[in-house]
């Protein structure tokens, strides 16, 4: 690493970047490595889904706000209808966000979903339908964040 780089070339929020990647990597790593060390499907299911849920929460509520200035949530209106809300920083604030932070956020968001899809294909090839359930839950959480943050980025006020 070149230490003579200007400060703008480094991550502006290294802790947020670390935790953004940590939960994604831990869910994927546990799922992959658990096949080698654990014979109990229930333990694999619970721990993997718990790690994926922690990743979902961290991305939605922490790293999305800090790294890319975006936030989304769901409300139930008076008619009982589900309404999705999207919020982002103003254009001037968005322009000041660190490019490396943004790059890390978007690439890991999409690559995690791709990794779950690849693992799902392997589970289908190996005829492990029960493991496809784990993949389905984890992929659903990943895709929910992708949809939410993509709509935020495009400036949609509600869905």
Image (cartoon, rainbow, N blue to C red):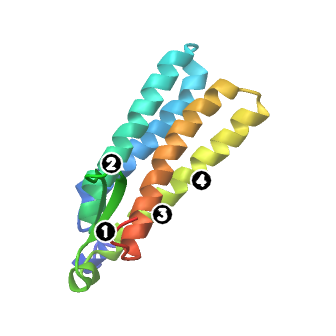
Q: CA distance from mark 1 to mark 2?
A: 31 Å
Circle 3: element type: helix
- Give the residue pinned by disc 4: 114
Q: Write down the quadrant of residue 15 in the picture.
A: bottom left
Neighbourhood count class around disc 1 (C-alpha, 10 Å): few under 14, some 14–19, many 20 upward = many
Label located before the other in sequence (1 or 2): 1
Residue at 48% from the left image edge and 49% from the top image edge: 142
Q: Nearer the viewer, mark 1 or mark 3?
A: 1
Say left or right for 37 vs 130: left
Residue 153, x across and y down, in percent: 38, 73
Disc 1, disc 2: CB below 8 Å?
no
Task: Find numbered disc 2 in the image and state the secondary structure of the residue it sits on.
Answer: loop
Question: In the image shown, does 78 or 28 lie closer to the viewer?
Answer: 78
In the rendered image, the vertical position of residue 71 relative to residue 115, given as above or below: below
Q: Is residue 32 visible?
A: no
| Pointer 2 residue | 80
Q: Position of residue 156 (x, y in %)?
A: 38, 73
Q: Real-space Cα distance between discs 4 and 3?
A: 10 Å
Q: Nearer the viewer, mark 2 or mark 3?
A: 2
Is 93 located above or below residue 116 in the figure? below
Q: Earlier in the sequence, mark 2 or mark 4?
A: 2
Q: Secondary structure at mark 1?
A: helix
> Depth-wise, is mark 2 or mark 4 nearer the camera?
2
Q: Residue 107, which numbered label? A: 3
Instruction: Point out the tag, 4 or 3, that comes first from the N-terminus.
Output: 3
Which quadrant of the structure image shows residue 16?
bottom left
The foreground one among 129 and 85 is 85
Q: Is 66 left or right of 36, judged from the image as shown?
A: left
Instruction: Using a 10 Å C-alpha cutoff, classify the residue at mark 2 as few (fewer than 14 neighbours), some (14 to 19) or many (20 or more).
Output: few
């Amino acid at each position: 690493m070149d230490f003579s780089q200007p400060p703008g070339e480094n991550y502006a929020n290294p802790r947020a970047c670390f935790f953004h990647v940590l939960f994604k990597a831990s869910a994927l790593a546990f799922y992959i490595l658990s096949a080698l060390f654990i014979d109990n499907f229930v333990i694999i299911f619970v721990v993997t889904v718990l790690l994926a849920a922690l990743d979902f929460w961290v991305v939605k509520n922490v790293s999305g706000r800090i790294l890319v200035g975006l936030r989304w949530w769901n409300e139930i209106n008076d008619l009982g209808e589900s309404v999705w809300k999207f919020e982002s920083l103003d254009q001037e604030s968005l322009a000041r966000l660190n490019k490396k932070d943004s790059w890390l956020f978007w690439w890991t968001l999409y690559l995690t979903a791709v990794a779950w899809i690849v693992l799902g294909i392997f589970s289908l090839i190996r005829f492990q339908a029960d493991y496809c359930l784990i993949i389905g839950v984890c992929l659903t959480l990943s895709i929910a964040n992708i949809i939410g943050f993509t709509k935020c980025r495009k400036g949609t006020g509600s869905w």
